[in-house]
Image (cartoon, grey):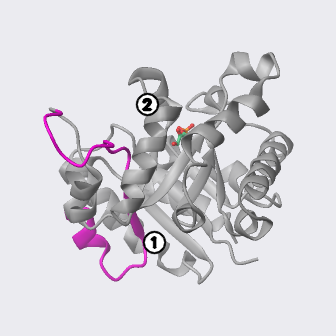
Amino acid sequence: MTRLKIVAGNWKMHKTLEESQSLITEIRGIVRDEIRSNTKVIVCPPYIALAAATRLLEGTGIGLGAQNCHFEEQGAFTGEISAGMIKSTGAEYVIIGHSERRQYFGETNETTALKSKTAIRHGLHVIFCVGETLSQREDKSYFRVVEAQLQEGLFHLDRKEFSHIVIAYEPVWAIGTGLTASPEQAQEMHAYIRKVVGMHYTDEIANNTSILYGGSVKPDNAQTLFSQGDIDGGLIGGAALKARDFVDIVKGMH
Ligand code: 13P
């Protein structure tokens, strides 16, 4: 099994340019010894900090990602950012399909499909988010919902393209709420996602795909979550905004 363990920080709409530079400098200073050959640490600050972050992260082994991109190459889309623009900052990753984009900005399985294709064409790795809402958890449709997000948003990619995908399972009811999926609930979904990927591609591809958990991951629950067989790390929101907490979560990978 060669899949990477990954901890990625999604900073959402937090931090000015200066604040972003300070946080990256702080993280860079304390995370160094925690980066091993089979682990990856990624930060996803707001767009305005990407170019500066590239300079600060040079030679550290820490990856850099954006939080969204448009699916068109360029054009009259005021306020939008293309995959090529992200790539030009030095970033290597982009988060696509985050539930906040699905909820507040009209992201659909169809747009996530277009975005993943464009991002990969530009040489970016995609952190592709899936996850059910509370009502979907309660009415027990969560496996179906997540499977549709994968089928419609990702499975148009060919095998080579799919090798650039990291999946993040983020149950919407656990994001920013302090409610974490139990390690068993998360493991159950991660195993299901891996099975669905295996059925569509191959078991080898499924075994090589990193599947991250996101939703109220904190230093005190990270290790238990990450020790589950199919949980290959985390996508961290609130706790990624404090260098010490973020690095403590990174330590939970070992
Ligand atoms: P929290 O860690 O703040 O719950 O956010 C999770 C998330 O949405 C990461 O993308």
Q: Name the image quarter holding the N terminus.
A: bottom right
**SS at mark 1?**
helix
The vertical placement of 202 against 156, above or below, is below
Q: Which mark is residue 101?
A: 2
Q: Was residue 64 drawn as part of the magenta stretch in this picture?
A: yes
Could you tell me how far apart the alpha carbons at marks 2 and 1 are, in whole angstroms?
31 Å
Tell me if I can see residue 190 in this picture: yes
Amino acid tagged 2: Arg
Q: Which mark is residue 30?
A: 1
Q: Which residues are magenta?
A: 52-77
The vertical placement of 26 against 225, above or below, is below
Query: Residue 209: x, y in percent?
Result: 66, 63
Query: Residue 54: x, y in percent?
Result: 26, 68
The answer to which image quadrant residue 201 occupies is bottom right
Query: Ligand 1 is found in which quarter of the picture?
Result: top right
Residue at image point 55% right, 68% down: 160
The vertical placement of 249 against 150, above or below, is below
Query: Residue 197: x, y in percent?
Result: 72, 54
Classified by dominant secondary structure, the portion drawn in magenta counts as loop
- The residue nearer to you, when weighing 251 against 235, is 235
Q: Name the image quarter holding the C terminus.
A: bottom right
Disc 1 residue: CB within 8 Å of ligand 1 = no
